[in-house]
Image: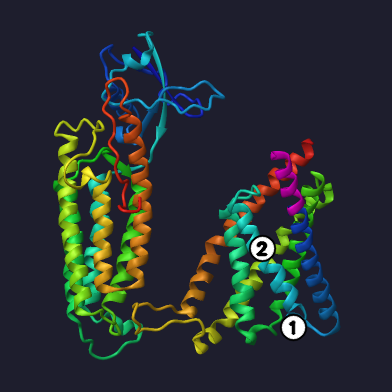
Amino acid sequence: MIVTVTTRSGRELIKGGLELNDSATVADLQEAIHKRTKKYYPSRQRLTLPIPSGSKEKPTVLNYKKSLKEYADGNTNNLTVVFKDLGPQVKYSTLFFFEYLGPLILYPIFYYYPVYQFFGYKGERVMYPVQTYAMYYWCFHYFKRIMETFFVHRFSHATSPLSNVFRNCLYYWSFGAWIAYYVNHPLYTPVNDLQMKIGLGFGVVCQISNLYCHILLRNLRGSDASGGYQIPRGFLFNIVTCANYTTEIYQWLGFNVATQTVAGYIFMVVAASIMTNWALAKHRRLKKLFDGKEGRPKYPRRWVILPPFL
Amino acid sequence: MAGIFSSLRRLYLVIYNWTVFLGWLQVLYLAVKTLKESGPESVYAAVEKPLILAQSAAIIEILHSLIGMVRSPVTATLPQVGSRLYVTWGILYSFPEVRSHFLVGSLVMSWSITEIIRYSFFGFKEAFGFAPKWLLWLRYSTFLVMYPVGISSEVGLIYKALPYLRESGKYSIRMPNKWNFSFDYYYNALLVLGFYVPGSPHLYGYMLGQRKKALARAKTD
């Protein structure tokens, strides 16, 4: 089979096309493109079928596991695919690791080191117990997230664009430093003992539930990493579609109840709105996929992300 | 129903645009008069009320693009209007110390000329469905000079106000407080100045693109 690879502007990326045997898969094609172009390794490539000019439909993206024949539409001799360079890619675990490493390192710096001298505060700083607990709570949270990244999560996409690393690190690192600045401030005002205990207690329960949610999600995806969608079940997933986000948001609520900073609440609201967007999309997708028609199971009635509100 | 609604919308926009136009016309008239009779140091006192009114009316413009009443995206309107409101309320109104600076003269001149052209352009388009060619040309050409003048006046005035912002501590919130929050109006101003660095060339480039599109369309019509 001769595969012609063009760019989106219609230029031929590889002169003369590529000769592949009839049983070749999309992955084989990607390897062949990589070999010829050197620069574009498979995860950098997005291959689609050409769309008729003027058509507003979204092009079909080629799945690397499928055979090329499935896209050839009966014509086994020729196939034209459109190539798009997605830019440099990094593994998802790398992206997550660097996102979480910032807050994990920055927060203790504000706790342990006399950084407030640079902001004009001289003299000794007396730490309240809540500030110490908050530091351990914070570090446990990000340590847990890094561990989950390497040992629990299964990613539906293998890679992410390199530019996301810079964007996401800016988000996590600056929010982390901003919150740490206030919680460890020499002029920090703590809440009463009971409020602190309720906040931290609730937060710890949510963090542990969050870990359990992640383990359930991992098992849902199965070891074959098929990437196919399934109805999330078990534990809190019987009530909420995205229980993993719910527990994540509520554990920040616990942290904020205990530490009471405006910065922490702002971070929580921003994070919650980002996760709500993802959750709405996932909920919609699951409801569409499991519509209860033609033998497909019906998606049960559930909260989306934030019971008892949404 | 749709017909009534769209006529009402047009009528409303016609009234809105021409009213704000009149406001800016008054600002320009008073500014020119004061510049001729005394000098740039008395411009603010002469234009204060109509300037604040006309500039604050632009808040409604953000609402217009938010609810989709006009086509311009809110991401284009918000930073432009936001920076103007900041200079009007947050600097000139709040810190009388800078009002007599000569940059107020160039600031008010460039703002009012730009806005007179812009509001009359939209006023024409909403009222008659088209704007005269010369007005279209003015709308997409005067910014070439007016933007740099306006932006440098804005930046200059913020810079001149910095010592007063710092000294007075106005609008700043200090620790300790129950909600463990602080806000420093002085550092906020430095941040705003920082945003002008990438923001100004971006806006200028955006307008150059608009100019190219609009003038090319006018030629083919």
Q: Report the predominant secondary structure element of the magenta stretch.
A: helix
Q: Residue beneath label 1, please?
A: B45
Name which residue type carries label 2. Ala
Report the disc number at residue A215: none
Please tell me which residue lies in front, A281 or B174. Answer: A281
Start and end of the magenta stretch?
A: B1-12
Q: Residue at x 72, y 73 (%)?
A: B51
Please determine whether, in this image, residue A18 is positioned above or below residue B211.
Answer: above
Determine if the magenta segment contains residue B11.
Answer: yes
Mark 2 surroundings within 10 Å by alpha-carbon count, few (fewer than 14), some (14 through 19), many (20 or more):
some
Q: Report the side of B50 relative to A271 (left or right).
A: right
Q: Residue furthest bottom?
A: A123
* Image quadrant in which the N terminus of chain B is located: top right
Where residue A200 sits: x, y (%)?
A: 19, 68
* Secondary element at tag 2: helix
The amino acid type, in three-letter code, at marker 1 is Ala
Q: Quadrant of residue A266?
A: bottom left
Q: How many marks?
A: 2
Closer to viewer: mark 1 or mark 2? 2
At 75% from the left edge and 57% from the top edge, which residue is drawn?
B17
Vertical order, B103 against B198 (above or below): below
The answer to whether residue A199 is left or right of residue A291 is left
Q: Foreground residue, A246 or A238?
A: A238
Residue A145 appears at what percent x and percent y? Answer: 20, 55
- State the image quarter where residue B85 is shown: bottom right
Mark 1 or 2 closer to N-term? 1
Q: Residue at x 80, y 65 (%)?
A: B22
Q: Residues within 10 Å of mark 1 (few under 14, many from 20)?
A: some
Q: Is residue B107 among the parts visible in the rendering? A: no
Write down the residue under mark 2. Answer: B58
